[in-house]
């Protein structure tokens, strides 16, 4: 299934987006609803809260008095941790149970107000953040929920900041305007991104080839790469040695195809094969065929090639190349060296930019990047030699200067 994490600050209009996605056919799992369900009268969760915090956390009807519980549970770190230890495992287990009931071709939208605060973003194929200007959110809270303005401001201040949500967001919906505007954005997101994304993951669909098209450097590429790397690290589990943003999008000022190059380093290629399905389930589909890097001595015999595994992202709106290399070979180190050498040498960035532009023009009608990549390799190989000289002069190592 495709897992979408939905979040947003109080008053941003997240429920409007959730309802629209459900109208399209998404399976909605509401974290707040589950949190209430696991402490309803008669549940073990409520009984344990009473045992931990006393009978006075119950109302006259025997249901949980949330205000009374908060007055006791949030008086200190110890009591807060006790509350979390009772409630959070039950919320997790119920969420897993609901997820297990979902059809394999479903798009699941997990509505989690504290997704960012809880560091949950890597668990999803896509994180959708609903936002609105603060004055709009305050007006909504005052008018629709009857909050005092001071209380509304305090609630907003207690949640994740706009910057923190931006860092986690694969999709950012500004809901400051009218309802029709955000609904149109959700409709387009569903049709153009979520539906094909789900099919690509389920069918392990290969990415269609395309001609090389260069764009100017995007300052958001590193943040986009870090979100993808967090998912890669989670999927790799204990097979992970390291995961890095490499390639042209990792070098400030360098033109590039709008494709993030990531490198997952593992101990052996057997480990790479062992996590292939986990990576695919996380949205990184393994490409068929044999993949390798050419040795720097020019030898092209099969036994001399630097073999690797190659995965691509299933998200139709965010292309990613994931190179999975063994730490026992030299290619993983060269990828990091080449990146850091370019970062430290603006003149080389300018020369590489010129070469890339020349080759992109020459191969603009190819319908594939193969010819572009093969011709570019001569410049890259010469660059490796200069990068090694730079590393020797500066004391660079793959683990840092």
Image: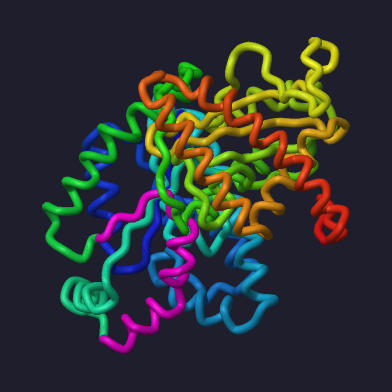
**Residue at 84 percent of width and 35 percent of height:** 327
Q: In front here: 209 or 30?
A: 209
Q: Quadrant of the C terminus?
A: bottom right
**Residue at 40 percent of width and 56 percent of height:** 7
Residue 372, image x, y percentages: 51, 26
Image side of residue 25 versus residue 78, left or right: left
Residue 265, image x, y percentages: 76, 37
Indicate whether residue 163 is drawn in magenta.
yes
Residue 123, image x, y percentages: 56, 44
Image side of residue 223 versus residue 28, left or right: right
Indicate whether residue 160 is drawn in magenta.
yes
Above or below, 20 against 80 in this view is: above
**Residue at 34 percent of width and 55 percent of height:** 172
**Residue 300 figure quarter:** top right
Q: How is the image coloured?
A: rainbow
Q: In front here: 253 or 177?
A: 253
Segment colored magenta: 149-174
């Amino acid at each position: 299934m495709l897992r979408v994490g939905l979040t947003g600050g109080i008053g941003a209009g997240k429920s409007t987006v959730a309802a629209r996605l459900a109208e399209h056919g998404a399976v909605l799992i509401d974290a707040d609803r589950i949190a209430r369900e696991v402490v309803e009268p008669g549940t073990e969760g409520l009984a344990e809260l009473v045992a931990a915090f006393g009978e006075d956390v119950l109302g006259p009807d025997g249901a949980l008095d949330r205000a009374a519980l908060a007055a006791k549970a949030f008086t200190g770190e110890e009591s807060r941790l006790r509350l979390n230890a009772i409630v959070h495992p039950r919320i997790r287990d119920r969420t897993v149970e609901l997820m297990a009931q979902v059809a394999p071709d479903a798009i699941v939208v997990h509505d989690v107000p504290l997704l960012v605060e809880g560091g949950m973003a890597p668990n999803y194929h896509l994180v959708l953040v609903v936002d609105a200007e603060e004055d709009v959110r305050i007006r909504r809270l005052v008018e629709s929920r009857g909050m005092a303005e001071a209380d509304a401001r305090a609630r907003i201040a207690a949640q994740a900041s706009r910057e923190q949500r931006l860092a986690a967001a694969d999709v950012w919906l500004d809901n400051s305007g009218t309802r029709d505007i955000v609904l149109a954005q959700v409709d387009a997101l569903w049709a153009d991104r979520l539906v094909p994304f789900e099919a690509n993951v389920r069918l392990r669909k290969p990415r269609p080839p395309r001609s090389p098209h260069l764009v100017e450097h995007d300052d958001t590429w590193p943040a986009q790469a870090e979100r993808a790397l967090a998912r890669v690290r989670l999927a790799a589990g204990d097979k992970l040695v390291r995961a890095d943003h490499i390639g042209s999008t990792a070098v400030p000022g360098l033109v590039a195809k709008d494709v993030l190059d990531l490198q997952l380093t593992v101990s052996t290629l057997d480990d790479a094969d062992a996590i292939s399905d986990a990576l695919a389930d996380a949205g990184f589909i393994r490409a068929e065929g044999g993949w390798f890097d050419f040795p720097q001595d020019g030898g092209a015999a099969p036994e001399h090639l630097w073999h690797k595994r190659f995965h691509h992202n299933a998200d139709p709106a965010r292309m990613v190349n994931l190179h999975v290399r063994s730490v026992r070979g030299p290619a993983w180190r060269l990828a990091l060296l080449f990146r850091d050498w370019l970062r430290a040498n603006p003149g080389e960035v300018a020369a590489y930019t010129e070469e890339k532009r020349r080759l992109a023009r020459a191969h603009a009608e190819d319908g594939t990047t193969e010819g572009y990549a093969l011709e570019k390799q001569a410049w890259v190989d010469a660059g490796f030699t200069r990068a090694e000289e730079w590393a020797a002069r500066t004391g660079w190592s793959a683990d840092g200067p």
